[in-house]
Amino acid sequence: FSIDFNVSSGALSTSSGVTSVGAFVWISVAAPAGSVSFSVKHTAGVQVEVVTDDQLQVAPANGGKQWPLDHGTILKLSMNKASTEANDNKVTVNYYGEDGGPPIDQAGVFLTGIGISLDVDADRDGVVEKNNPRKVTLPLVPSHQRSPECCHVGRRTKDASIDLLRVRGEGSLTKLHSWRECATGKSHFSKHSFPPTPFFLLDPFFGQRYIHVLGRRKLYHVVKYTGGSAELEFFVEGLRFPDDTFSGLVSINISLLESLTEGIPRAPIFTDTVVFRVAPWIMTPNTLAPVNVFVCSVKDNYLFLKEVKSIVSKANCDLKVCFGYVNRGDRWMQDEIEFGYIHAPHKCFPVVLDSPRDGGLKDFPIKEILGPDFGYVAREPLFEVVTSLDSFGNLEVSPPVTVNGKAYPLGRILIGSSFPTSAGRRMTKVVRDFLYAQQVQSPVELYSDWLTVGHVDEFVTFVPHPDKKQFRMLMASTSACYKLFREKQKEGHGEATMFKGYSGTDTKRVTINKVLSNEVMMQENQYVQRCIDWNRDILKKELGLTEKDIIDLPALFKIDKMGKAMAYFPNMVNMIVLSRDLGIPKPFGPIIEGDCCLEAHVRSLLEPLGLMCSFIDDISSYHKKLGEVHCGTNVHRKPFSFKWWHVIP
Amino acid sequence: FSIDFNVSSGALSTSSGVTSVGAFVWISVAAPAGSVSFSVKHTAGVQVEVVTDDQLQVAPANGGKQWPLDHGTILKLSMNKASTEANDNKVTVNYYGEDGGPPIDQAGVFLTGIGISLDVDADRDGVVEKNNPRKVTLPLVPSHQRSPECCHVGRRTKDASIDLLRVRGEGSLTKLHSWRECATGKSHFSKHSFPPTPFFLLDPFFGQRYIHVLGRRKLYHVVKYTGGSAELEFFVEGLRFPDDTFSGLVSINISLLESLTEGIPRAPIFTDTVVFRVAPWIMTPNTLAPVNVFVCSVKDNYLFLKEVKSIVSKANCDLKVCFGYVNRGDRWMQDEIEFGYIHAPHKCFPVVLDSPRDGGLKDFPIKEILGPDFGYVAREPLFEVVTSLDSFGNLEVSPPVTVNGKAYPLGRILIGSSFPTSAGRRMTKVVRDFLYAQQVQSPVELYSDWLTVGHVDEFVTFVPHPDKKQFRMLMASTSACYKLFREKQKEGHGEATMFKGYSGTDTKRVTINKVLSNEVMMQENQYVQRCIDWNRDILKKELGLTEKDIIDLPALFKIDKMGKAMAYFPNMVNMIVLSRDLGIPKPFGPIIEGDCCLEAHVRSLLEPLGLMCSFIDDISSYHKKLGEVHCGTNVHRKPFSFKWWHVIP
């Protein structure tokens, strides 16, 4: 905004202008005939700097200093507080001739300062500062998440809680904006959502009522200024998570417009902008403390439930049992949902991601989990076929890692996929897109399609460990199992029997010798090890791990008719991790001197790390149905103390 | 990929494995009963390192060094060249007892090394290196660009030039890939496009024929290995520019798969990846040298054409006249198209962006510009109404700038928009999305909707200048005009007359005194100056400019019935810039002592910068129809010497 500096010879001519506090006005100094130097006098509310050849000199208010008149000399004016009435500030330039006598000419400008700012909680301490110059990207909590794909569900939810939402508004809505306006009665005030953000609502709070002023198709809103000082509060609410088509960034602009004359449009004077980032959905790795453990009660898992209850009480968290009338016979609690959370300076609350899987547990997340303090989000493909890889046993997250100097302080999401072999099954695009769009837990795609069920939790998990790394990665290993069995055979325990005490349909006696002499099984497990090792290489690279960070848990697999792998005995890596307490599928391994040698081996690997191993019998209720303890449970964990807005992308 | 290290007491037992050259194999060293230390012997093709407590020690090939046997001791094996036959390399471990005598046990592994790599021109010098470890993002030239929105046009074009396209293939296609494979007859070879890139073709070149193996729905391709050494060449072609829904990044993966036994799927051994980035479409600012100047011949612009021809010949470039049968009376050459180019190490060629405007010049870019060495791309909205802001007089690009330390070595795109006032007109989303998606000339949106026509070229342009900044920004300025007129009035030239020699319909005599005494005109131009200054502030901030980088060209506007502004006299900023030669709309300003004082003033501003001003009479043929010289011309310029892949995002 610049004012034409009107210099007319022989008379004091003035112009006037409106400027915004904190902004600059540039004025070029014209030289009247005969003048060779000038001085500048100004009122206290104005700062004046004289700019010559890119040098800046502050002009004293009293006009006591003279400058030579160069072509291109510019005055830089600024005001640091709002005017109390129109034209209450003035800058006067006096021109002097060769003789150095009294001024031969004079020119001046009246100035009105208007304080206008979009104020936000830029330092994220919960308090809105006044005109903080650091207009950083601000976290915005999306409220009551619903995907466009499940509007029939979402609408009902929203209708049911609309009053609640409004009442909660004061807590969950972010205080966006205040403005102060002084002097000159001709100003208008305009806000403009730019680029259009149809998922966005901005509500000014008048008395006890929120009025929807921006969002969806409302791209701007005008507030008429009628005089005096004023402050308005606006509230902003996120309605959608970041996604493939929405980066999560929302800009709000405020512009001060001045009406000059009737018939001429309003002229823009000053624009201020704030940018919000909708809070991403964040997953919680095994290294975070458990809050609630969810498990299904079905007709044949009473003993399993009892064992889970025991470990849950040891770990000091709560057991939430989902009963038959809700789960409708679906026991795969891990697969239907994934727990996560969203975080803003004023609010942090858990949000469940609903899988497109939709088994008997389909209605569980909405009926039982969604509530005033538990958000819900779902992504479902419109046309793609949902496969087993869309179950959330195939969606895990690593603990925080640093990879070649790059920190992932919230860990990295792990997704099982069909790579590197031919097309195969893959997690549906809408869910993968959603996960990538959250940005702060940069996903890694692994190869899980070699498995019958095809979930990453069938070959990898993480346990906490109080060293610098903070965790160990556990991987299923068929070579570790062969190695152990050969050692035991060498020690004379070749006839030790597996599956003892398990009264299943397999009544044939299975010994170490039989396993080791089975050529087909050895080849199948050599193949499985290749598949696991391919993932192991990716994980080492993408999580920055060394061999020392990895612990191999013995496992054996068999290949089905489709050429896919399933666990031969309960797959111990598919465990539940509750702080230091591990609920591990009981492997029913070869009994040597009264002990299962697989359990003993795993204890010898994990107990020195301070972990407590409980082996849970899941063989008939889960293992035989191609899942284990982890597949049958789900853990809602505490959020990270690390704040996502400190993640460097 | 790890091999189970088979240790059996008392006899030499061997296993074998296939590894990829350059990859690592980790083997844990088990201790046979009674052993306390070990040594490692290996063939020349293998490197062995002994890893203990994260310390690495190279094992000499002759086995001359002994290491203590610790729990967790690991051997790290790697091979640096391909085997010439299967199992031609071997690693042997000897175990020693307490007494330090001869080995009490031995174990070994045979190794076969396979050299496999995806080789590309990673250093972008036009030559494909062998196994360059720097697998950087590679530029890919999109060929024959067509948008999905103009398929009817594109298809015809493609049909017409399909043979040509294939013949050009060798030049325009990038040599992607070679692989070398040695030894063991059991390997398979798979390439997998991941994520799916439906706009992508990969063709291996067999003899003289390209076979389409990857792209669209072909997500993988298997090459069976039948023995011996081999090298295959693949070619990759970009089919689509980066856009809203396509980042421009394309990954190609190659995996070495091994068939273990009949009935077991192929196991992955090693994966290599290259990432290509489709070359962005790059605009060329006024500071680049002109190649061709395009202008329309219409019934009333003969004299204008003659003047343009004169300046074009001065600037040493070519004039391309678009005749009536193609332009169908449409004279706005600037508005229908924007010239740009694409660049890859092996190829750089011009590409025209077709505006959704579609006036009489609609078919011009396809009929006259598209050709074997001139690409074409268009973006048209499906449903949105096309407005005047979609014309490419509203699409310009700055010269290279640095803003607070951040470099934009290809300049920044400038788009006129309706911000900061209410909703208004805006460039259509598909075009804006396209421009943003190119990434390397990060767009800035300006406010041009205050103008009747609404184009950024009505208030800003750039001229070259041989100083550090390399350019000056010129802006229309009503206050500069008022200042000049007041000075002239003061000097006694108040009765100097405008529009002299122009025989238009306005026969009223317009003098400096009349202009300065017109209160409505002054208010309207004060408003216009506010609108320009708002843009000036944005441009200073987004291009990192100071007042010294900006030159104000006198201009006056009038406000139409809709409250929008149009030029009162020919708007000089709307000039054509051909290196140092400027073709400026002749302003028909007040004649003082036989000279136009506006021309004289502009010469005094620009000629000291080494620029040559030619004033071109466009008043009846363009100005009266709301455009000027720039609107009626278009310049195809030389590309930047700076390579876009060095832009830091």
Image (spheres, coloured by chain):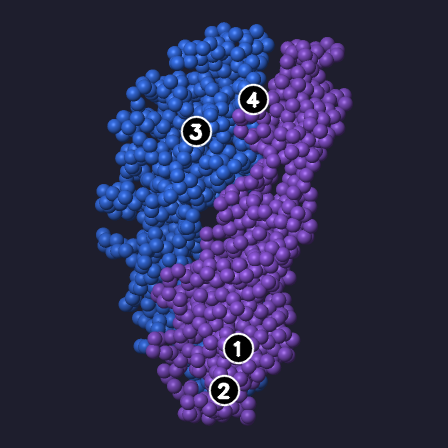
Chain colours: A purple, B blue
Q: CA distance from mark 3 to mark 2?
A: 82 Å
Q: CA distance from mark 2 to mark 1?
A: 32 Å
- Chain letter belonging to callout 4: B
Label 3 amino acid? Val
Label 4 amino acid? Gln
- The mark closer to the camera, 4 or 3, is 4
Q: Residues within 10 Å of mark 1 (few under 14, many from 20)?
A: some
Is disc 4 on the same chain as disc 2?
no
- The mark closer to the camera, 3 or 2, is 3
Q: Nearest the camera: A114 or A470?
A: A114
Q: Nearest the camera: B212 or A326?
A: A326
Q: Secondary structure at mark 2?
A: loop
Q: Is residue B343 above or below residue A315?
A: above
Q: Nearest the camera: A97 or B37?
A: A97
Q: Secondary structure at mark 1?
A: loop
Q: Position of residue B66 (x, y in %)?
A: 54, 76
| Mark 1 touches mark 3? (CB < 8 Å) | no
- The label shown at residue A589 is 2
Q: Quadrant of residue A67?
A: top right
In the rendered view, does A462 fall on the left or right side of B582? right
- The mark closer to the camera, 2 or 1, is 1
Q: Position of residue A105 (x, y in %)?
A: 69, 13
**Dot 3 corresponds to which residue?**
B453
| Mark 4 touches mark 1? (CB < 8 Å) | no
In the rendered view, does A187 fall on the left or right side of A568? right
Label 1 amino acid? Phe
- The label shown at residue B523 is 4
Sequence-earlier tag: 2 or 1: 1
